[in-house]
Amino acid sequence: MAGVVLLCATSCKSKIDKTIDEMLQKMTLEEKARIIVGTGNEGRWVSETSFGDMKNIVPGAAGTTCPIERLDIPFVILSDGPAGVNIDSTRENESGTFYCTHFPIGTVMSSTWNTELVENVGRAIGDEAMHYGVDVVLGPGMNIHRHPLNGRNFEYYSEDPLLTGKTAAAMIRGIQANGVAACPKHFAANNQETNRMGNDVQVSQRALREIYLKGFEIAVREGHPKTLMTSYNKINGISVSERHDLVTEFLRDECGFDGTVMTDWYGGDHPEEQMKAGNDLIMPGQQWQMDSIVNAVNAGRLDIKYVDECVRRILKLVYTSPRNQPGHTYDNNPDLKAHAEITRQSATEGIVLLKNDAQALPIASSVKNIALFGCASYDFIPGGTGSGDVRRAYTVSMLEGLQNAGYEIDPLLSARYDEFVKKSVAENLTKVTARFADMVRIRPDEMPLTESEIAAQVQRADYAIITLGRTCGEYYDRTSSDFVLTDVERAMIENVCRAFHAAGKKVAVVLNIGGVIETASWKNLPDAILCAWQPGQEGGNSVADLLSGKQNPSGKLPMTFPVVLSDIGANANFPVDQTSENVSVASRRVDRGEKNVDFTRYDEGIYVGYRWFDSRQVEVSYPFGYGLSYTTFDYSNMKVKQSGKEIKVTVDITNSGTVDGKEVVQLYITAPGASMDKPAKELKAFAKTSSLKPGKKETVTLVVKTDDLRSFDETSKKWQLEPGTYKVMVASNSRDIRATETIEIK
Ligand code: BGC
């Protein structure tokens, strides 16, 4: 592969350390401040006031560290993001294109529950970064889905920290297998976009430790990221990038993180506090931040040892990065074809079959003509917006995917949708006044269907597919009206189902969404529901592979689908429809003490997602971990062994149906809860079987460390293990427990 160079292993580590020592001796204070304050690529992401002098190297990349030419200190290039490398696809004065593969969004990755697959996608992302001369990939995104309306949930993995941490670790290992650095973000408790730069998260130590830091802890311990990004928000009054207890004590001393910490773009207000906290790199910097570091040292307020430590860690990143290895080259020519296959296949494992009455899916082989409804069928959404977007060469729509699979779609209906989509997008474009309008993917309204139009399709087609689309992205939280169906969408489902069912024909609904939507009120109508999420640029092909039965769904939900928003533990403390001034890049909003905007109280504590719904026994639309298959699985022969500090569970999974399939097996544990407040159950391990032929059996092994059963005690500020009887459950989802055993912990 072009430009791949083996990075120095231990032998030249000491050489690098010596070079760094030497540079630290030679650098002036101003040069040290200069390298701490990174540059931004002018244009897309940064304001005019930041340093923009590196713009020509990889256009569209998010920034670079600053080179110090006097000492021949080179730089590195940082680029988003979580679903693929996010750089400009065309360049001034260059005729070629620089497309990257748009892989499935983070939520699709976690829905696979397949860490090997995630690692493979990470490897492909890292490979594209190498080919385009990028050294640091600003991903994975891994904040907890605290509330379904967070605008950036699509980049993130789950409401559960274990699934989040394991998925992130796999993504990091994959990206870094190429020599480039991954950058898990946004550390930590960055769970809303509303006033994201100023919001103060008011959270208990226990919830912080068990829910919001846990995923990062796992990702650091098991993924060994070379860099990490702190978040914009404050935690209990102080910006995360300025918190020594989180950045140094927790991350480095406790979790063993030994890489470079950077701010989110323009995050934090006090450079000297960031230095003291151990937040090495300030991205993408501004002159006042450099001045502030220099002045603080000169005035004796900031000990130079903090500055030196930060510079040391930045230099380590610089000297070990791909572009600074001897003979490094890159060819701007990744294997986009091979990666298209990877995205197509990986998405199929993260798409979740929510409903399948009377084997409505896969579509019977006799079906040739499909009536394809819903604007998103034609204007398919591959991913979210903002820095998590990717400049891809194309998106395969549902229309194209179904046609590629050999189905026929009425060209007249297709033409009518095309025309409507164009008109509606143009109209909606004129309504957008947002500051980041260019980063919002303008969606059409849904096209109202007449009865005769539907009747014509019933005549023509053997099967109906309706796609519902939702877009979301950086800077904005979703609204409650985005959560529910519009009147036109509801009428479309009702009328299409009524007409097709009257003719004995089936209807499937495909959800092309970046975050959870309301399903409880309409899910009884169609025969099947497939949650495709935003499955990347090959999306239409991936969905068609499942609808046609070429692939068997094996994704499961990484979060709960609630009945209504008000059922959610965090709902009263989330900015639902609070559209106050919420976007701020170069300046800060003045703190007006507005609830859920200036501060957000995490009153639900550790009761996030299924921990809340299952402990309170709240009815849900689809539970955490839920997902159907075209086959069925039997669980048998569960065995639990306790040895030393480990609990080992084995269970036999047999494919009891008629087609090949994979099953996601989940291990939940219920603590005694006698001396400590404990949730009804917590996910402690999971595994996915290989593809099992009908009748075939696989023994799945799930291992839990006794330490992972501990809870964080607020009073002693220590992790504590509650003695007593624990229930160990293997399950198909959080509400479908297949076998239970008990163990005693002394
Ligand atoms: C986002 C980060 C991103 C950075 C650089 C920020 O606005 O929050 O996730 O990596 O920009 O593009």
Image (cartoon, grey):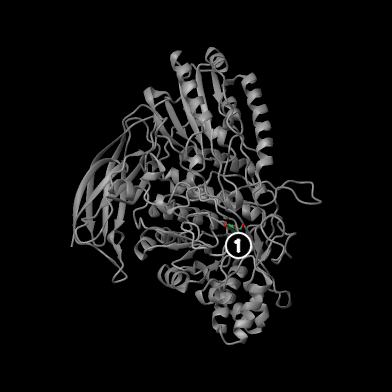
Spot occupied by residue 524 in the image (x, y as percentages of width and height):
39, 27
Q: Position of residue 521 (x, y in %)?
A: 40, 32
Q: Which residue is mark 1?
A: 265
Quadrant of image for the C terminus: bottom left
Residue 662 vs residue 8, the one in the foreground: 662
> Is 292 drawn above or below residue 675 in the view shown?
below
> The residue under label 1 is which amino acid type?
Trp
The answer to whether residue 226 shows anywhere in this view is no
Residue located farthest toward the right when viewing the structure as drawn:
93
Q: Residue at x 58, y 38 (%)?
A: 381
Q: Look at the numbered disc 1 and say if its residue's Cβ is closer than 8 Å to ligand 1.
A: yes
Residue shown at 44% from the left, 17% from the top = 501
Q: Is residue 38 above or below residue 486?
A: below
Question: Is residue 170 toward the left or the right of residue 403 in the image?
Answer: left
Residue 281 can be seen in this image? yes
Residue 186, above or below 111: below
Horizontal side of residue 478 vs 26, given as left or right: left
Instruction: Determine crowd level at label 1: few under 14, some 14-19, many 20+ residues with C-alpha closer than 10 A.
Output: many
Percent coordinates x, y for residue 129 in the rendering: 62, 54
On screen, residue 107 versus residue 79, left or right, reads left
x, y percent for residue 141: 51, 54
Q: Quadrant of ligand 1?
A: bottom right
Total labels: the figure holds 1
Q: Secondary structure at mark 1?
A: loop
